[in-house]
Image (cartoon, rainbow, N blue to C red):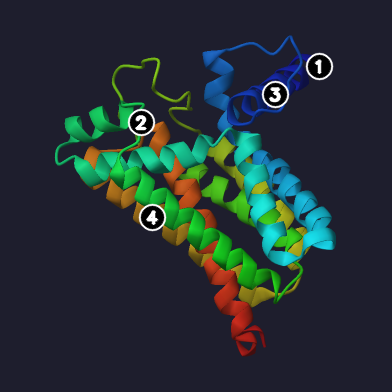
Amino acid sequence: MKNALRAQIHIFFTALMFYTRIPCPSWVTHSAEYLNKATVYFPVIGWIVGGAAALVFVAAQGVWGGLVAVVLSTIATIWITGAFHEDGFADVCDGFGGGWTKMRILEIMKDSRVGAFGVIGMIGMLGLKLATLYELQQMVYLPPWLIIGHTLSRYTAVCLVATDEYVRENDDAKAKPIAKGMGKKDWFFATLLALVPVIWAVSGLWPVWALLAVLVFGVWLMMGRYFRKRIGGYTGDCLGATQQVAEVVIYLGLQALFTHKWLLV
């Protein structure tokens, strides 16, 4: 029992080490075995990153107001993760925007340089995220929704790992470290972890539950279908892009729902 608990603690810190810049204990070292299991804690990383965003937002809102608070909270999440997912989204924009074959797409995504598609994509993504959060914070108390957005968007990427194939045949220095599969038990456990902030914040608002379910599974199915069609599966960059798309789609859906409050009746 102790060994199993110790292993889970190591797996969690492995996830924290690879997916954030938060310092970890010195005994946490790189392990392909633990990294392959670490995706189960991806929703918990969402708790942490979303919680940090919420704290920064609350602190900044009292001093500078909503717009600056939204910008600073977003910057905080980028800093904590080292722009890990944003980099993946930019690479996907470059690869799928400039490549016509599977090999060319994978080759472009492996390039460390950011091209026009990546720059334009990131400007659009960040601009849309900031605008949506600014509008949303005028309608509701934003911090719980930040945590939900970061958690469920990472859970969307977990679903992709659980159902699709990793397509890079050869790992290299540029390829992002990522799990290459997930069992049904781990997927179920990750689902429970993803539901924790929703249960805490949403309570009996069943229209919100329904909306979040539709958005998460919609992004998962559409992104998965697109990646399978173009390259036959996912890469680490594809998971980062999925997280970014899912996060913005969740905020957009929530903004639409709270704008038309009659839908909550």
Distance CA(mark 3)–CA(mark 4): 29 Å
Rendered image: mark on residue 221: 4
- In the structure shown, which secondary structural element does the residue marked by tag 2 occupy? loop
Residue at the location (62% across, 28% down)? Answer: 15
Q: CA distance from mark 2 to mark 4?
A: 16 Å
Q: Does residue 231 appear left or right of residue 92 in this picture?
A: left
For marks 3 and 1, the one nearer the N-term is 1
Give the left or right position of residue 12, taking residue 117 as reference.
right
**Whether residue 264 is situated above or below residue 105 in the rendered picture:** below
Residue at the image position 75 percent from the left and 73 percent from the top: 204
For disc 3, the neighbor class at 10 Å (few under 14, some 14 to 19, many from 20) is: many
Q: What residue lies at 64% left-to-right and 41% top-to-bottom? A: 189
The residue under label 3 is which amino acid type? Phe
Find residue 255 and report its image quarter: bottom right
State the mark number for residue 166.
Answer: 2
CA gap between label 3 and label 1 equals 17 Å
Tag 4 or tag 2, which sits nearer the N-term?
A: 2
Q: Is residue 224 left or right of residue 133?
A: left
Q: Amino acid at mark 1?
A: Lys
Instruction: Answer few, some or many: residues within 10 Å of disc 2's Cα (few below 14, many 20 plus, some between 14 and 19).
Output: some
User: Where is residue 32 drawn, in percent x and y?
Assistant: 52, 15
Q: Which mark sits nearer the N-terminus, 3 or 4?
A: 3
Q: Is residue 158 above or below residue 30?
A: below
